[in-house]
Amino acid sequence: MDPDTVTRYLAKDFWSTVDKKFSSEPASETSTSEDRGYIYPKVTLTFAQTLDGKISASERKQLLISCKESMVLTHYLRNQHDGILVGVGTILNDNPSLNGN
Ligand SMILES: NC(=O)C1=CN([C@@H]2O[C@H](COP(=O)(O)OP(=O)(O)OC[C@H]3O[C@@H](n4cnc5c(N)ncnc54)[C@H](O)[C@@H]3O)[C@@H](O)[C@H]2O)C=CC1
Ligand SMILES: Nc1nc(O)c(N)c(N[C@@H]2O[C@H](COP(=O)(O)O)[C@@H](O)[C@H]2O)n1
């Protein structure tokens, strides 16, 4: 399977799970990636940006961009993954919790 097809497949499956969660239908929490036939790790890129394309304030100062609903989605996404990867600059600047509440 070519990488583009795999990406489309994973995104479709992932967002259908999100839809199920937000419509309160039970999502399959127990099936593993292997059960679902995945052959690559599932990776999601998520970030918040301003209308003019910025992700932080000047001098890379941390900036809250997301609204309340978007933060709910952020924490939901964190809960759906086994790990969260950020850059070293983010660790040094923000000292983030990166929890999923
Ligand atoms: N709005 C949002 O969703 C987010 C905003 N931020 C903000 O971004 C700022 C941090 O940004 P940065 O310091 O720019 O990012 P960063 O330092 O967090 O990430 C960049 C990473 O790329 C690596 N890197 C740089 N050049 C590379 C190369 N040529 N090849 C391979 N790796 C390379 C660096 O070593 C670093 O680990 C903070 O102010 C933080 O608040 C961070 C995450 C999310
Ligand atoms: N979703 C989201 N919206 C924003 O407006 C943001 N600035 C970020 N930033 C990311 O979240 C980390 C902070 O997380 P904690 O609240 O400490 O758990 C920060 O370091 C960025 O990676 N995200």
Image (cartoon, grey):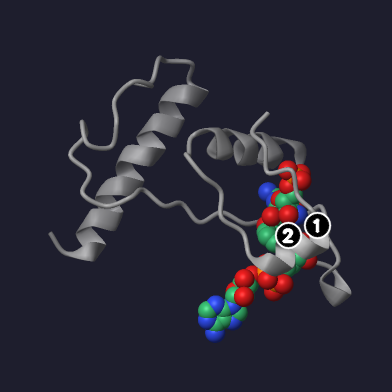
Q: Amino acid at mark 2?
A: Ile
- In the displayed image of the protein, which residue is found farthest to the bottom? 59
Secondary structure found at label 2: helix
Residue 38 occupies quadrant: top left
Q: Which sits in the foreground, 15 or 83?
A: 83
Q: Position of residue 89 (x, y in %)?
A: 72, 69
Q: Position of residue 61 (x, y in %)?
A: 86, 66
Question: Residue sitting at 78 percent across and 63 percent down?
Answer: 92
Tell me: 71 left or right of 18: right
Mark 2 closeness class: few <14, some 14–19, many ≥20 residues within 10 Å:
few
Mark 1 closeness class: few <14, some 14–19, many ≥20 residues within 10 Å:
few
Q: Amino acid at mark 1?
A: Asp
Ligand 1 within 8 Å of the CB at mark 2:
yes
Secondary structure found at label 1: helix
Q: Position of residue 14 (x, y in %)?
A: 37, 39
> Measured along the vertical axis of the image, is residue 59 above or below residue 77?
below
Q: Which sits in the foreground, 87 or 18?
A: 87
Q: Quadrant of the N terminus?
A: bottom left
Residue 74 occupies quadrant: top right
Tell me: 16 left or right of 96: left
Tell me: 34 left or right of 11: left
Residue under numbered circle 2: 91
Residue under numbered circle 1: 94
Q: Position of residue 2 (x, y in %)?
A: 16, 64
